[in-house]
Image: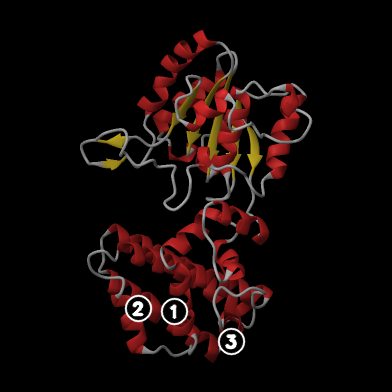
Amino acid sequence: MSDDIIPEPDRLDGAPHPRETPVLYGQQPAEAAFVDAFRAGRMHSGWLITGPRGVGKATLAWKIATFLLADAPPDMLGEVTLAVPPDHPDARLVQAGAHPRLALIRRPWDDKTGKLRGEITVDAVRNLKHFFQMSSADGGRRVVIVDAADEMNRNAANAILKELEEPPAGAVILLVAHQPSRLLPTIRSRCRELRCGPLTPEDLARALAQAGHSSDNAAGLAALAAGSVGDAIRLLGSGGMALYADLIRLFGNLPRIDRQAALALAEACSGRGAETRFGLTLDLIDLFLARAARAGLLGAPATQGAAGEALLLAKIAPDPRAAQAWAQLQQDLSERSRHGRAVNLDPAALILDMIFKIEETAQGVAAA
């Protein structure tokens, strides 16, 4: 397949690639921590950028890379910022994906299957030896971005560990990790961590506007996306807000379920072309159960994901005992969902089974 049409595993549909994102919102503490270390001359060769999916970790990595490759001009050191003028020669090369001193490691394309591989393989990391040899001739810093580091298989992880143990002069390795606990402890110990947190509703709205998105229920979107721009864009692009509203209406009569409405919702997840809706429905059911469990401990949420949600959660999760029941159901149905996807269970049957389990749990809570 031509390089021009191979999908980028680190690009989210409906959003600019992290290297193309003009402004990073909500991660000023992580930015400041890096710039302060740079100013003080405490630069590590390895940096571990962690946090939930979709909050700007990759964007931060690309901005750090551009900052380092541009050799941090003196006029950029007066403020705590990674900003580099977009017309800077190094910034333009980074934007074009053609900077000779920048290497990107991510899941490769498999010509045999016609799909992206499920993990980062060792060959992608072994190519760094050649990269460091070639880029050293240009002088200046060399930067490597691994996105996402927790997608490396064991051989790839061991290969990147060797680079972290004996980094070439002037080399900086940026590891983006959604689940840093999956990394080798020795990798984590050789990196300084930059933690990115969920965005506030205000920063989330700004980030969405920058990506060309808006919502007539911005507060509800922020609540369901939990501060993740990536999750918010997925919800907007796939009709997730409307689907969550359908779920709230369906569950609104708990501890009883409208059988016809349940069947209609389940059947909408079946058939050709319904794969995205099926996956989204499973994710939103899981989210609903998590919110129900939390409501039992903390009370109904201040911000609703859909109209009527707060009243529903107050009814079905009135106390910690109910919270425990919903938390257990979430765990059970999450496992059921993973198993169902793995063995290709009929989507409609799986969704119906989960809905009836929710009804059964609600009845048990009401009767207790």
Marks 2,3: beta carbons within 8 A: no
Task: List the single residue furthest toward the front.
Answer: 87
- N-term-proximal mark, 2 vs 3: 2
Mark found first going from the N terminus, 3 or 1: 1
Q: Distance between the residues labelled 3 and 1?
A: 18 Å
Q: Name the residue under label 2.
A: 265
Residue 272: x percent and y percent?
22, 65
Q: Which of 201 and 34 is in front in this view?
A: 201
204 above or below 23? below
Name the secondary structure under disc 3: helix
Q: Hey, which residue is sitting farthest top in the picture?
A: 137
Which x, y percent locates residue 329? Answer: 47, 72
The mark that comes first in sequence, 1 or 2, is 1
Q: Can residue 282 be seen in this view?
A: yes
Disc 3 crowd rating (10 Å Cα; few below 14, some 14-19, many 20+) is many
The amino acid sitting under disc 3 is: Lys
Please, what is the three-letter code of the amino acid marked with disc 1?
Asp
Residue that mark 1 sits on: 246
**Looking at the rendering, which quadrant does residue 298 occupy?**
bottom right
Q: How far apart are marks 1 and 2 (CA)?
A: 8 Å
* Label 2 residue SS: helix
> To which residue does mark 3 refer?
315
Q: What is the secondary structure assignment of the residue under circle 1?
A: helix
Residue name at image x 40 percent, y 65 percent: 280
